[in-house]
Amino acid sequence: MRLIDRYLLRQLLGPVVLATLALTAVALLSQSLAGLDLIVNQRQSALVFLKVTLLYMPQLINLILPIAVFVAALVALNRLHTEQEIVVCFAGGMSRWRVISPAMRLACTIAFLALLMNLFVQPLSFRTLRQELFEVRTDLAATLVREGEFTEPAPGLTVYAQSVDGQGNLRNLFIHQVKPDGSTTTYTAEKGRVGRAQGRPALFMENGSNQEFSGRGVLNYLTFQEYVFDLAPMANSDELIHYKPSDRYLHELFFPDLQQDWERRNRLELLAEGNARLASPLYNIAFMALALAAIIGGGFSRLGYGRRIVAIGAIAAGVRLTGFLVQSACEDNAWLNIAQYAVPLLATWGAMAAIFRQKVSRYIDISRPRPGIAPAGVRA
């Protein structure tokens, strides 16, 4: 019997892994297209783009896993049942639970891995992602200049560069600054680059001129081979990284610091996210049970199980959509968090009830003879 268990498990494990990889690749492609702004507008390197894209993976995988389990289980179980291998298991004396136990053990293992990702991997990756996006947003080299555009990175400061090469060098640079006392200064330079001078951010300009017009009507003009424009006033920012509910660990969701205004105002949202972290892995078990119900929950059919699969697929989609709606509703009512667990558990119970309600057939249909199967008409 253990040999048959391992065989059934292998038949399910391969499609689950392949389906997960395929759906993750599609999701990453979609995410990467949305993240192209980092390269096009923020002028970040491909390494930063790749890092940001990969940091989204834990959440994407958790969303994809139940779908991958459902699709892969349908494919594997449909093949096993159509080729009468499951019928042979029943004919050999295996109980219905013994036949489905490899699939349910696989689903429980996947649910446990998803729980670990929810509790530890996702918060860590999203915190790193938030830090990376914060650094991109406060990157002076990226926010100071946009190629061929006049930008205002700070009040009273206008910057223009005709082009920016791959090394970050600014060509044909123009800077116009209006100071608080009303005086204006205009800088032009053939070349510029953002760097640091004495530990402070600065813009190094080469081969240019400086025209300063004071409020008293005095114009000062000079040329320079190299001039250092101080960017420290622009870099001084009191902005702090704010962690969203998806970035927080479980204890921060269930026991937030209520002395903080944001945590106090969003207490229910944090609670809903915490319960969703614990409840969402259950959908892997529910979707595996639904896939089993689609194939084993009815009688054998040589014409396939198209209608049954479509019906169960619609039920699975409805179950997951209900889960999202319940999570959203929990942000207004804490007691509804119980429903976050009830939705996948009820789906699992309904699927298992459909599986065990169907009477097991001990007859083998061998209109297409297969090796190792008794002749037609023999009752196992």
Image (spheres, grey):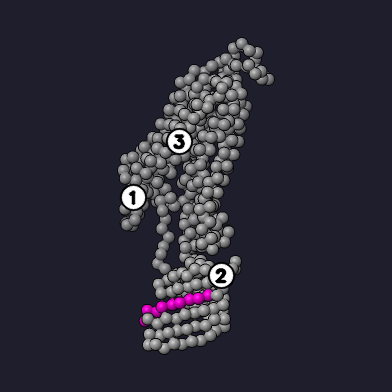
3D distance between C-alphas at marks 1 and 2: 48 Å
Q: Residue 26 or 377: which is nearer the viewer?
A: 26
- Residue 335, x across and y down, in percent: 32, 40
Q: Is residue 175 rendered magenta in the image?
A: yes
Q: Position of residue 350 (x, y in %)?
A: 43, 28
Q: Secondary structure at mark 3?
A: helix
Please state which of residues 252 and 238 is positioned toward the viewer in this rendering.
Answer: 238
Earlier residue among tags 3 and 1: 1
Q: Which residue is mark 3?
A: 317
Residue pointed to by mark 2: 163
Q: Kindly give the residue lying farthest to the top in the view shown.
A: 377
Position of residue 120 measured from the top left corner of the image (x, y, whole percent)? 48, 48
What amino acid type should be assigned to the residue bearing mark 2?
Ser
Compared to 41, does 232 lie above or below? below
Disc 2 + disc 3, Cβ < 8 Å: no
Q: Residues within 10 Å of mark 3 (few under 14, many from 20)?
A: few
Magenta: main secondary structure: strand
Quarter residue 5 falls in: top right
Q: Nearer the viewer, residue 130 or 210?
A: 210
Q: Residue at x 47, y 55 (%)?
A: 127
Residue 40, x across and y down, in percent: 53, 60
What range is drawn magenta here?
173-181
Amino acid type, callout 1: Arg
Q: Amino acid at mark 3?
A: Ala
Which residue is pictured at 50% across the width and 26% down the height? 307
Q: Which residue is mark 1?
A: 267
Q: Is residue 21 above or below residue 182?
A: above
Question: Which mark identifies residue 167?
Answer: none
Q: Quadrant of the C terminus?
A: top right
Count neighbours of disc 1 (C-alpha within 10 A) and say few if under 14, some if 14 to 19, many if 20 or more.
many
First in residue order: circle 2 vs circle 3:
2
